[in-house]
Image (cartoon, rainbow, N blue to C red):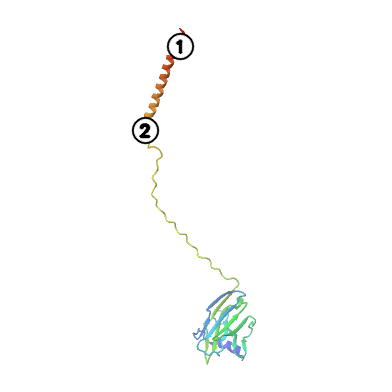
Amino acid sequence: MQSGLWLLLAAQLAALHGSSVLQQAPGSILVQTNQMVIMSCEAKTSPMSTRIYWLRRRQAPSPHSHHEFLALWDSKKGIVYGQNVEQEKLTVFTDAVRSILNLTRVKPADSGIYFCMTIGTPELTFGKGTQLSVVDVLPTTAPPTKKPTPKKKVCRSPNPVTQKGPSCGPLTLGLLVAGVLFLLVSLGVAIHLHCLQRRARLRLLKQFYK
């Protein structure tokens, strides 16, 4: 049996519980179509020569779900790919302590949970997995709606009414009436004097022409 097929069978029979021995990062990735994705896996207690396998589960756990072997890095052979893997968009390499999985030009079909795994004797050790979600359009978050701040009512004391002109009291009315009467009396006196002067002129003219 080929090593890739044996690995798939072993992965489906293993109980998938995340291990602290394999530290996988990040926990989840949301990315737009045709972007690049990078995941890492570090074996804390294993020797640096330990092979780290990369697997993918395309759907949620069910009797029909399975783990697809993607690739691993071999110090002698380089990258070893699984069957039907698009090699031009998937790369695996290692640095001092980690295995790095690099995916380019991702599509929605690449969505799933990506696991790193090591093979021991006899157990299999899995990382906690990275949930990859590839979408054509990233969701937008609407800004929070700000509630209008109620305006505080300011109680103002009524302004005193400014009175224009003199007050319309009894004294003022009395003064007005007295002033009118004085004008009327003055007018009557002036008319009477005018009449007296006219009579005096007429008398003087009559005496002059006698």
Quadrant containing the C terminus is top left
Crowd rating for badge 1 (residues with CA inside 10 Å; few <14, some 14–19, many 20+): few
Could you say which quadrant of the image residue 173 lies in?
Answer: top left
- Which residue is pictured at 54% across the width and 88% down the height? 118
| Residue closest to the eye, 114 or 22 | 22
- Reply above or below: 101 against 121: above
Q: Label 1, secondary structure: give it.
A: helix
Query: Residue lying farthest front?
Result: 208
Q: Report which residue position mark 2 lands on.
A: 173
Identify residue type, mark 1. Leu
- Residue 204 in percent (x, y) is at 44, 12
Q: Earlier in the sequence, mark 1 or mark 2?
A: 2
Identify residue type, mark 2. Leu
Query: Residue 101, can we see it?
Result: yes
- Reply above or below: 151 against 94: above
- Which residue is pictured at 38% across the width and 31% down the height? 176
- Which residue is pictured at 43% across the width and 19% down the height? 194
Q: Nearer the viewer, mark 1 or mark 2?
A: 1
| Residue closest to the eye, 173 or 202 | 202
Q: Which mark is residue 205?
A: 1
- Residue 80 in percent (x, y) is at 62, 87
- Total label count? 2
Q: Gap in Å between the C-alphas at discs 1 and 2?
A: 48 Å
| Residue closest to the eye, 138 or 154 | 154
